[in-house]
Image (spheres, rainbow, N blue to C red):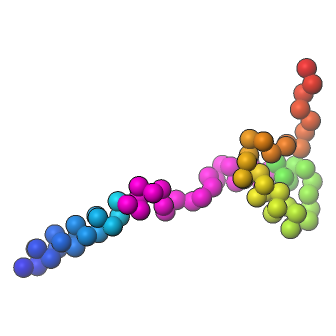
Amino acid sequence: MSAVRLVLAFASVAGTASPALAMGGGGPPVSITTANYCRQTVANKGITDVTRFDQEVKKCVANPVMYPPAYDKPRW
């Protein structure tokens, strides 16, 4: 009887875990590399106010490709 319960327990756990994994849940919302890049980019701009620093990091994390870096773009 306990073997049947064990099989049913594993089946129910497997059935509930797969939809969560399929939806991409469980991982961090932002990659560590992106967060580090954004913090460094904002720090290079010289922003010292904590509130503004956090706002700029959030802007960068939302769209790191279009966030303006601290240096000028080359004019060829």
In this rendering, position of residue 14 left or right of residue 40: left
Q: Which quadrant holds the N terminus?
A: bottom left
Q: Nearer the viewer, residue 32 or 54?
A: 54
Most distant residue in the left direction: 1
Q: Residue at x 91, y 57 (%)?
A: 47
**Residue 35 rendering spot, x and y as whole percentages:** 70, 54
Q: Is residue 54 magenta?
A: no
Res. 7 visible in picture: yes
Q: Residue at x 84, y 52 (%)?
A: 42
Res. 36 visible in picture: no
**Residue 17 rendering spot, x and y as whole percentages:** 35, 64
**Residue 76 rendering spot, x and y as whole percentages:** 91, 20
Q: Is residue 34 magenta?
A: yes
In this rendering, position of residue 5 left or right of residue 22: left
**Residue 7 rendering spot, x and y as whole percentages:** 16, 69
Range covered by the magenta-colored residues = 19-40
Q: Residue at x 22, y 73 (%)?
A: 9
In this rendering, position of residue 53 left or right of residue 6: right
